[in-house]
Amino acid sequence: MAPKTFIMIGRSGCGKGTQADLLLAHLKEKTGLNGYHLETGKKFREFIQSKGYTSGLSRQIIEEGGLQPEFLAIWNWASSLIENLTPDVHLVLDGAPRKLFEAEVLNLALEFYKRENPAVIFLNVSENWARERLMERARGDDKKDSINKRLAWYETEVLPVVEFFKKKKNYHFLEINGEQPIEKVQADILKGLRI
């Protein structure tokens, strides 16, 4: 099996990171190829801990539950791809893209890297379900107001990205009910991807 590309998308708290790790472990066992899990949220959290003018402004956006501007979001995953991607690994993007323009740029990046037939895994969960998970997780940036803001911008910013990928003919779009046990979600993903 040639290296595959997967984009995990869904509301904050829907389990993208967990499912990305499980998918890469399955692929490693099945194909022997390593995977690269590009976690944009984790990279932003590391970035805001650094000292600097830009990281300070980015930290303020995260604390307020806002979306990072497109140029920073694209820098986040683009620099990771440039530094870490090799042609012999499976790639899972987790947390990107979150805006339509970012999705268009990511599409161009995947074309540049000759990553053919990417799969988009849409973990569909309700707002209430996601809110409960985010409150349980309660990371330092997960305050009630910021959680509510993130869930609100999902409707206006992320859903257009979902529609963008649904319509792309060279993408395999897979919608999964994320409100199931972790193992069932994984089984549905593997069945839908036929791997």
Image: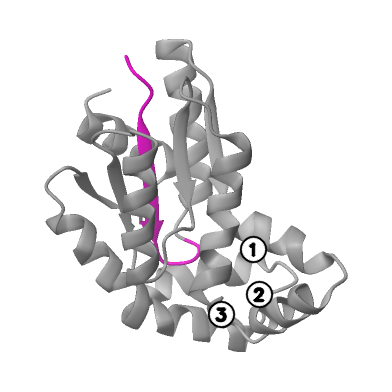
Near-viewer residue (155 or 116)? 116
* Number of other residues with Cα within 10 Å of mark 1, as a class: few under 14, some 14 to 19, many 20 or more: few
Query: Mark 2 or mark 1, which has the lower sequence index?
Result: 1
Q: Could you tell me which quadrant the N terminus lies in?
A: top left
Residue 38 within the magenta-colored segment of the rendering: no
Sequence-wise, the earlier of marks 3 and 2 is 2
Q: Dot 1 lies on which element? A: helix
Is 2 magenta? The answer is: yes
Mark pair 3, 2: CA separation: 6 Å
Q: Which residue, given by chain and number where applicable, does mark 2 sit on?
A: 142
Residue bearing the label numbered 3 = 147
Residue 195 against residue 80 in the figure, above or below: above
Which contiguous range is marked in magenta?
A: 1-13
Horizontal side, residue 123 vs residue 149: left or right: left
Quarter where residue 118 is shown: top left
Question: Would you call the spot at circle 2 few (<14 residues within 10 Å), some (14-19), or many (20 or more)?
Answer: some
Residue at 46% from the left image edge and 51% from the top image edge? 16
